Each structure stands twice: as structure tokens, then as C-alpha cells.
Image (cartoon, rainbow, N blue to C red):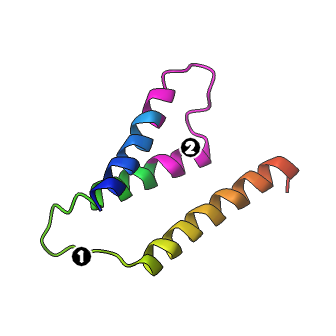
């Protein structure tokens, strides 16, 4: 799953580069949420410890479902001012 690590760390790097733009909100909840989770997923998939094991498809599905549902709820609440 080295490709997952590369994807996660690429998303992290791109988000860090967007911090150079002066017109964005640095403490936006969705931006920080994606930044932290992409870094965490990228680093953990590099398998620095022999105790780490591969995740099955169901584990990835549950992780992505929770991340997408949180971001969807956040964007919905911002859009419709709940």
C-alpha cells in the first residue's frame, strides 16, 4: 500500500502549499481536518514499525466513510447555515 502513502502525503503537501495564498482561512475546520488526516494516513502507510499490518478493504471503506460523512456534514452546515 505504498501508493496510499504517496497519495496521502501528496494531498498533505498540496494543502501546505495552499497556505501560501494570503486570502484563505488558515484555521478552516475542513482544511485542518483534511490536512491532519492526509498526513496521518500517509505516514502510517509507510510502515515504520513491524507491528503494523495491512488493512483489508472493509477497514478502508469504514475510514473513508467516516471522513467523507464528516466533511459532507461540515459543508452542508456551512452552506445552509444550520
Question: Is 74 part of what is drawn in magenta?
Answer: no
**Mark 1: few/some/many CA within 10 Å (<14, 14-19, 20+):** few
Q: Quadrant of the C terminus?
A: bottom right
Residue 55 drawn at (x, y percent):
34, 75
Q: Residues within 10 Å of mark 2 (few under 14, many from 20)?
A: some
Q: Position of residue 46 (x, y in %)?
A: 23, 57
Q: Residue at x 45, y 72 (%)?
A: 60
- First along the sequence among labels 2 and 1: 2
| Residue underneath mark 1 | 53
- Counting from the top left corner in percent of width and height, residue 76 is at 78, 55
Q: Is residue 41 above or below residue 51?
A: above
The region drawn magenta spans 15-35
- Which residue was labeled with disc 2? 31
Residue 65 is drawn in which quadrant? Answer: bottom right
Residue found farthest to the left: 50
Disc 2 from disc 1: Cα separation: 29 Å
Element type where label 2 sits in the image: helix
Q: Indicate whether residue 32 is drawn in magenta.
A: yes
Q: Is residue 29 left or right of residue 77?
A: left
The x and y percentages for residue 63 are 49, 70
| Numbered disc in front, either 2 or 1 | 1
Amino acid at each position: 500500500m505504498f501508493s496510499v502513502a504517496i497519495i496521502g502525503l501528496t494531498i498533505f503537501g498540496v494543502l501546505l502549499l495552499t497556505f501560501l495564498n494570503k486570502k484563505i482561512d488558515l484555521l478552516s475546520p475542513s482544511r485542518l481536518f483534511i490536512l491532519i488526516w492526509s498526513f496521518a494516513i500517509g505516514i502510517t502507510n509507510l510502515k515504520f514499525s513491524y507491528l503494523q499490518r495491512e488493512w483489508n478493504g472493509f477497514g478502508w471503506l469504514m475510514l473513508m466513510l467516516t471522513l467523507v460523512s464528516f466533511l459532507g456534514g461540515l459543508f452542508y452546515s456551512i452552506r445552509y447555515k444550520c
